[in-house]
Amino acid sequence: MRRLDLASAALLAILAVIFPFFVNAYWLHVMIIGMMFAIMAASWSLLAGYAGQFSFGHMGFVAVGGYTAGLLATGLNLPLPLGMLAGVLLSALLGGVIGWTCLRMSGPYLAIFTMAFSEVLRIIIVTEVEVTGGAGGMNVPQLFHARTDLPYYYLILALLMVSVGGMMAVVASRWGLFFRAIRENEQAAAAAGVKVTRFRIIAFAIASSLAGLAGAFYAPYIGILTPDVASQDQMGLVVAMAIVGGMESLPGAVAGAIVVEFLVEALRSYGQWRLVLFGALLLFTMRFARNGLIAPGWLRLRNLAAPRGARLAKEAAD
Amino acid sequence: MLQYFLIQAANGLVIGILFALIATGLTIIFSILKIVNFAHGEIYMVGGYFGYYVITLLGVPPFPAVLVAMALTFLFSIAVERGLLTPLYSPRIERKADYGILVTFGLSVFLRNIAIIIFGPFPLRPPSFITGDLVLGGLIISYDRLVAAGGGLLLLGALIWFLNRTVWGQALNAVSQSRESASIVGINSERMYMLAFGLGGALAGGAGALIAPIYSLSPSMGLVPDTQAFVIVILGGLGSVSGTIIAALLLGLSENLFIAFLPDPSRGPSYANAFGLAIMMLVLLFRPTGIFGRQHVAME
Amino acid sequence: MTVENNQDETGGASGTSPGVAFPGASSGVSAPLPRRDLLALGAAGAAAALPLFSRAARAAESIKLGWVGPLSPPGGYAEGLLMKYAAAMAADEINAQGGVLGRPIEILYQDTRGLPAEGTAAAERLIVQDKVVALLGEFHSSVALAEMEVVHKYNVPMMFCDVWSQEITAKGYPQVFRNSTTFPLLDTAIAQWIVAAGFKNVALLCEQDDIGLAGRKIAADVLTEAKVPFKLYTADPQATDFTAQILRIKAEKPAFDFFFVLYAEAGAYPMVTQAKSLDFAPTPQTGFFLSGGEGVDPTFWKNVGNAGVWLLSENVGLPKSGWNDMTKAFVKAFNAKYKTDPPGSAMESYDAVRSLVEAIKSTGSTTPEAIIHGLETLKWTGTRGLYTFSTSHTPDWAFHQFMAAPMSIIQYDQVNQSSFDAPIVWPKNYATVPYLYKTPTA
């Protein structure tokens, strides 16, 4: 990792830690939600952008994480952190299973299969009202009993740094190489010795476990969990965040999530126009800036900082 | 009991024909452009509204209004294609399927929400084609449904004739098999893409206009057909028109009979959709390209 | 590695597609970022940064209220919009008369889309960022439950409008008030009417969510106590085709003589037309009650046509016979501006703004304690009658509930009949016709 990258990462970390002291409770809340979405967007980006598995069932795993945590906490009176852990593990397991069932599918078939999975899950949650509270929602106890959201902020910050850090480590390793190989051309990758089956399942498991983690955080933070969390609208939001940030950049996805979340909040006063503008943003970005807005922008800024010759050399080494 | 079964089955078939109309457009789009149009349900919605306004603002009678709505939807779809999908044809985009998915997804969000602003949030209903119901013994079906089913059959028949008997249709077929070979024999593939997307959209729009008197129009009415159409198209096999029609009829029948006969009446309806989705997931497991689908061919 | 000057697309791996990609190759951007992208990035950044520059202290004198409700899917945006209009009308009228305490009022609107997380965020923003003195509105109970936690945390009073779950007031938060009816009031009354009208076998269908299920339970309890047999059904909130289900219900033996539906989604309209065309209800054999507000919406007749005749519904506005001057003025002005009759939920929204203003006026202050006290001691007549909020905790949902929330049962007897003119069959003191139920003519 280059010095500039490390320096900026450190700076960001410091800013993140002191952030709560400069904003009011509302923006703190927005940032927390943004970071939560960042975990969802980054993990989706890992699966779809790096490994090429276009899953539209990601939010289903968010629901699995959230409802598992909630149900174990309210039904079996398990302490919440344990329930959250169970949620993450279940999501990982389920994600692996889905990854395994999809092995023979690709492209739109995979997309629709995973979308169907998410929808079926959502329908079950809605229908089994006695267990899940249905569309009216399920109350989840609080994780911290503090007057402010500060503990939640630091928790999600820690979770974000750990999950994104972990994912970046994976991506930089041979596993990341295998993922990209699978994405570009599965048959060639298999011919080159990549264990396609195993890594497709691994990719799904990792991504889903993190989605479950985000869901497990979401449940106690908001306090009420509804099946909408698994809806296609929410999926679209996460996809947009990953695209805006740049599909093949994990930090980009994080930045995309935070920017889009703030944008969505900023547009709040526009009422019905909010999603219109939002859909337009998605279209615009896809049409004209396919690699996203943030990652390429950041790369450009970064490259500007170095003299031209060194810049070319850096790019070659990249 | 037999009568109950027959009524439910008859209704299921009618619904199936309506599904088929929507799904066939989707499969044609996939067949030629090799993308899944996630905004198909919204084009269906737009077509329905076109029909409504053509009747109420221009005074066109309901039957011709369907054709006008189809024409308008055809133009609208072409505009979308020109505006958003042309990057698919250049080598610049590597993962074309992904692009198609994402851009049509964004389009669906956009259309669904702008429809609220343009058309207003309240459901609207154009006048019936024929008011009243057909009563045959114990069987009751509204005339509107029969008109919609009949219109749907006509359109499907016309489509099949078009695809098999006209030069344009055969050109489309050629492009769906191999773009390069088609251009070698002189077929302008870009024009075929326009035609395919326009045609697919027009079919969806026609469905919208036919179904509107039955279910009413609302900006989010495209959401359920979105998923239903996918289920059908996957079941029948992406790219196979006949497969789609058969799968649509099967789905309409089975969902209806599911609701009719599931022992627990309160869970039936909610799970009917899940039932269709589950069937699709099962089929995909064993036949990843659907019942009749060809091997998934990526766009070159 | 060549630097390609690609003006249109920042392509992937420089246009070539290696069989196995090398690390970093795909994420590298060898080409300068086209102006278009920079512009877009700048715009996005500016837009995102906008809210952080707090609005220039606009008229520091205005009193701010926060309105929440669904204005886009998946929420009930149709009703939400009308409620927003009504609140806006109230604000305009109040300001035209000089405002309150010498200051204009300003309403800030937030779209909560029917999602609890949006409700939380909206409430937080209105309170913390916009510093409103009170909140009002909402249409979905699940969202209200999330919002009330926020107002409770910050001690800001909130007047809930069209949310019927009893839990909202049952929790007993001092900040929470509700001016609409609630299930225990509404569905008890409806079920009692069903019993009184002499029905012997009822099909109870509700939409699969909290609104439906809670209401259905209350109705079911009343019917159980009165020993009227019934069967329970649910329907998908997103569905528009109920044919199979209706046929199944119709095929039940013994046949139902009443169909009570709690369904507040757009699908209610097709449900009515399908039930009618399948010759199930409303028919001479089976009556039909549609609860949830769709029966009195502006587009009801346009969508339902003849099938709506003989349908029963509740009306949560004041019956026309009980209209006071304010009701008449409001209905007239709303019609003039928005070309449609205001439903009861819109009246609730209008009255909410006005009653908050009354509370401020009466105590001369905008502190939370003052407003709460002002509402607790309120005796003010709005478009829906004389408002008072109970301070009793028995039953638990009575706390800060408008116990006298108007409710009447209407039964249409003509096509295109306005809900204001339809015959009222219940309660007796408002009834405009001598019968409890008119059997439909074939």
Image (cartoon, rainbow, N blue to C red):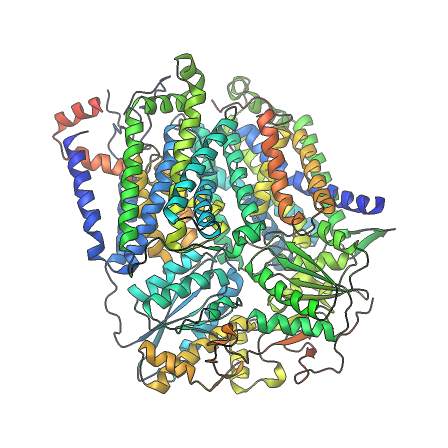
Q: Residue at point 39% right, 44% down?
A: A82
Q: Position of residue C227 (x, y in %)?
A: 74, 68
User: Relative to C51, is A188 on the left or the right?
Assistant: right
Which of the two residues, C151 or B218, is positioned nearer the viewer here? Answer: C151
Left or right of C348? Residue A47 is left
Residue found at the far right of this picture: B137
Q: Position of residue C130 (x, y in %)?
A: 30, 66
- Residue C191 position by quadrant: bottom right
Establish if A90 lies above or below A71: above
Task: Name above or below for residue B138 compared with residue C260.
Answer: above
- Rendering coords of residue B272 (x, y %): 65, 44
Total of numbered circles in the picture? Answer: 0
- Image quadrant holding the N terminus of chain C, namely top left
Residue A247: name its quadrant.
top left
Which residue appears at 58% of the width and 63% of the height?
C214
Q: Quadrant of residue C58?
A: bottom left
Figure check: B78 above or below C220? above
Tell me if I can see residue B258 in this picture: yes
The reply to whether residue C95 is in sight is: no
A312 or C431: which is nearer to us?
C431
Could you tell whether C91 is left or right of B226 in the image? left
Q: Residue at x 30, y 84 (%)?
A: C102
- Residue drawn at x 67%, y 52% is B266
Above or below for A115 versus B61: above
Depth check, front residue: C384 or A298: C384
Q: Quadrant of the C terminus of chain C?
A: bottom right
* Depth order, front residue of C386/C233: C233
Horizontal relation, residue A181 to residue B73: left or right: left
Residue A307 image offset from top left, x and y in percent: 11, 30
